[in-house]
Image (tube, grey):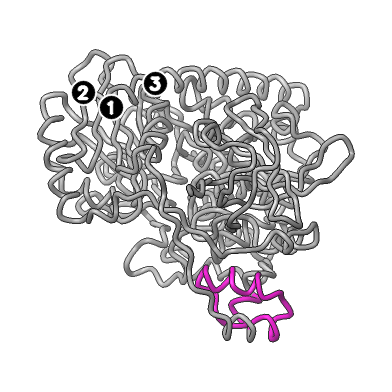
Amino acid sequence: MTERIWKIPKPDKELGARLAKECGITPVIAQLLINRDIKDARAVERFLRADISFLHDPFLLKDMTAAVERIKKAVSKGEKIMVYGDYDVDGISAAALLKRVLRDLGGHVTAYIPDRIEEGYGLNKEAVKTAHREKVSLLITVDCGISGKTEVEYLTSLGITAIITDHHKISEGSFPSKAYAVINPMQKDCPYPFKHLSGVAVAYKLAQALVRGSGYDINSHLDLVALGTIQDMVPQLDENRILTRRGLIRINNTDKEGIRALIEVSGLKGKTISAREVGYMLGPRINAAGRVSSAKIALRLLMTEDKSEASKLAGVLNRENKNRQRIGSSILREAVNKVENEVNFKEEKVIVLEGDDWHPGVIGIVASRIAEKFNRPTVMVSFDGGDEGRGSGRSVRNFHLFEALTQCRDFLTRFGGHASACGLGIMRKDLNEFRARLNTLASGRMEKKDLIRTLDIDMELSLRHLSPGFIAELERISPHGPGNPPPIFSSRTLRLKSRPRYLRREGVKLWLSDGSVTCEAIGFGMNDMIGEILQGDSIDVAYSPSINRWGGLETLQLELVDVKANLI
């Protein structure tokens, strides 16, 4: 792995001092907010308070009034309603939220989650036929449907009303114009002020509008909203930040048996759950079902009110997650070997890999690891021995993956996604031409500097700045995610005070000193890097500070992000 270039912005001391004085915050917090483009007192207040009262009116979303009136009519007349979701955490949590609300309002409601392998993403005709057989008269999509023009036309031909709620970018020629209502802030003529909601957040806005004036506590479901919003990697800004921050409070005090059981099986019972625990522990277990078995299990978990059933279902998801990890590790080893032996980096800026025995539910995760390791947009396609393959892609900064796919649509049987991730279908015979087209597009859009690995660092700090109080202050800008990454600091010319202690999972622990302050540091995936550094050597480190709680004790700890040896 090539060395990363550290990018540290020049601090705006004048603006930082003014914000610190006006807002009653420390200069460090002020600079962190400036780095995140939050530069006036009003914006600072909205960001730090993240109050529910700051949410926008749901009726600002185009078609919201029509959707609410139609749904209320269906509920009052006892029509059968189907909530149609997606098989990832965002779609599953959205389906669980809307089904719960409609049920509580007295609706006759069922939910449908398509099978990732057999049906693929979004609406499909077989599912439409199922809805017709079950005498559904109103179908509401969550986290999908914006590209379902053909399927929505089929729905309406069968006499089923379609309401689409989605958050994905709209591709030309596939807009579901026959839908009764389309709620998606990404529509060009939608006046909603925040365009980057998650799928579950759009479902929440619909539910919020539905229950207005009824006394129903829609915010009791913010735990579900936080699950999907964190896992979908939308910007942790504006409404997403409010919903996530308030939702995490709800998760830590949830009354939903399924979430409680998931917390317990993840080893988090009794611990404070942040966005990190959701992203790395809870979310992957929910996702695992849709990747390697059936997402319906995860939906049942989020819907159940039976403690025993919740425990059993959480156990199933835990086992499926371990299976997903095992499959993913095997595919990753094979994929890395392919890249190192088959990809010509002088000519190819985009990595396109194919395999005949790769599990299509796992290749998206592997593509993300490959893109990170080699700093190249990566598309992985599984053919499973057939002529048509299923692909997943992940991108890097400065290459909009979905826009690139729109210019490759003549090679694709289907596709969808956004700037940093995509899903697609492709015939084997078209793969080489697709690879060539994608790389031609990348050559015109990506400069050499875009392929250099960089690390954005907020500021340089002396170790003397670090304290439990300082770290508590940093918590004010959580939760973290795209648009609001965890603060990363750098400290230079530290001495390695002892030989590194190697831990499980490629972890390493060491002690660092600047001559007056000594800190414990821990890093993962950098054993080779640390192994070249000797006791007493001078190093520069990039890190996020944290408090390590173990055995009833609290100690300051640096979570290492990168290390550079000072060679003399």
Q: Amino acid at mark 2?
A: Glu
Q: Nearer the viewer, residue 370 or 249?
A: 370
Q: Secondary structure at mark 1?
A: helix
Residue at 27% of width from left, 44% of height from top?
Answer: 153
Q: Which secondary structure dominates the residues rendered in magenta?
A: helix
Residue 566, x across and y down, in percent: 51, 49
Spatial separation of the CA atoms under disc 3 and disc 1? 11 Å
- Mark 3, mark 2: which one is toward the viewer? 3
Q: Is residue 157 visible?
A: yes
**Residue 52 percent location from the top left of the image:** 67, 66
Which disc number belongs to residue 333?
3
The magenta span reads 19-45
Q: Is residue 416 magenta?
A: no
State the residue position of label 2: 388
Q: Name the amino acid type tagged 1.
A: Glu
Disc 1 and disc 2: Cα gap in Å? 26 Å
Residue positioned 30% across, 30% down in the render? 380
Residue designated by label 1: 340
User: In the rendered view, would you say 314 is above or below 541?
Assistant: above
